Image (cartoon, helix red, strand yellow):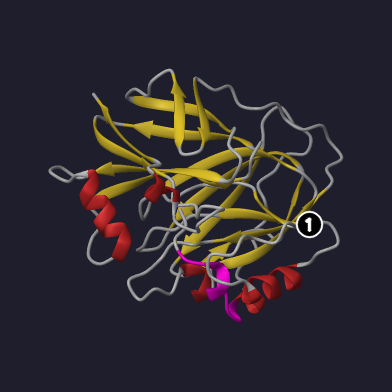
Amino acid sequence: MRHLPYVLLLATIACAGGEKPSADTTASAPATPNVVTVIANDFAYTAPDTIPSGMTTFRLVNQGQQIHHVTIQRVGEGKTFADYSEAMKALKPGAPLPTWITEEGGPNPPAPNDTTSVTQEMQPGTYVLICFVDTPDRVPHFAKGMVRPLIVTPSSTASAPAPTEDVKVVMKEYAWEITPALTAGRHTLKVENAGAQAHEFFIVKLHEGKTPEDMGKWAATYQGPPPGTAMGGLTGMRPGGVSWVDVNLTPGNYMMICFVPDAKDGKGHMQHGMVLPFTIS
């Protein structure tokens, strides 16, 4: 879920920090993924500085009053968080990311006081956790401090197996293929990006009487209460990337949205038609 150019990444990125809880891992029991808990407040993350490589579940706990997500970006070999900071400050509006920065997914927003999770294979390297959610004053959350580095170190144990999915989601330009159709209840979605550029999906459950058009109008300004409840999803994922997303759907009207800026014109993919209303009965 991303709306503004990276150029607004100001000096806050260089000094971003926060508390550093340990990653919840069990090195001797690789049958299940490592669990990394990221706590989001207004406007900071509490997260570990270092985690082991391998299959990892990122559990996002929103303790703030606003919605927050975690976009995971990988910094290329030989580059540092300082290099990332300088590159972001120099990036022009609508310009593509440097080729040494890749989008690696992450959990899209749960509602305040709720939790969402995404599982994916993490390779050793330098990463960044960042929140691109916008505000009415057009100062996105990362410019208010929601950005921090994450180092993934080589693990001495075998990686846990991937989760078992019951629904498959394929992302491409500018749509999702979902098989079988989503139904009420808990699901594990295997999400693959088969497109030529990064994509995401953000799930919103619309409030009674609200429409997809209401959601579109709200997302353009962030003024007033949102017309729906954030239900999670997957943040921007590079072409070829794979993640597993846990969702719990109750009856109602929903939307799936991709806000990732287009590689050609910089407009959000939502403006290219990457929006999917659906109903759960």
Q: Is residue 261 magenta?
A: no
Looking at the picture, does residue 5 appear above or below residue 212?
A: below
| Residue 205: percent from left, percent from top | 28, 41
In front here: 22 or 51? 51
Which residue appears at 84% of the width and 57% of the height?
Answer: 77
| Residue 239: percent from left, percent from top | 64, 40
User: Would you name the residue on which mark 1 appears?
Assistant: 76
Q: Secondary structure at mark 1?
A: loop
| Residue 50: percent from left, percent from top | 74, 57
Disc 1 marks a residue whose amino acid type is Gly
Looking at the rendering, which quadrant does residue 31 occupy? top right
Looking at the picture, does residue 275 appear above or below residue 249?
A: below
Q: Which residues are magenta?
A: 4-12
Looking at the picture, does residue 211 appear above or below residue 264?
A: above
Looking at the picture, does residue 183 appear above or below residue 205?
A: above
Which residue appears at 67% of the width and 35% of the height?
Answer: 33
Which quarter of the rendering shows the C terminus? top left
Which residue appears at 60% of the width and 70% of the height?
Answer: 18
246 relative position to 9: left or right: left
In front here: 197 or 107? 197
9 relative position to 167: left or right: right
Looking at the rendering, which quadrant does residue 160 occupy? top right
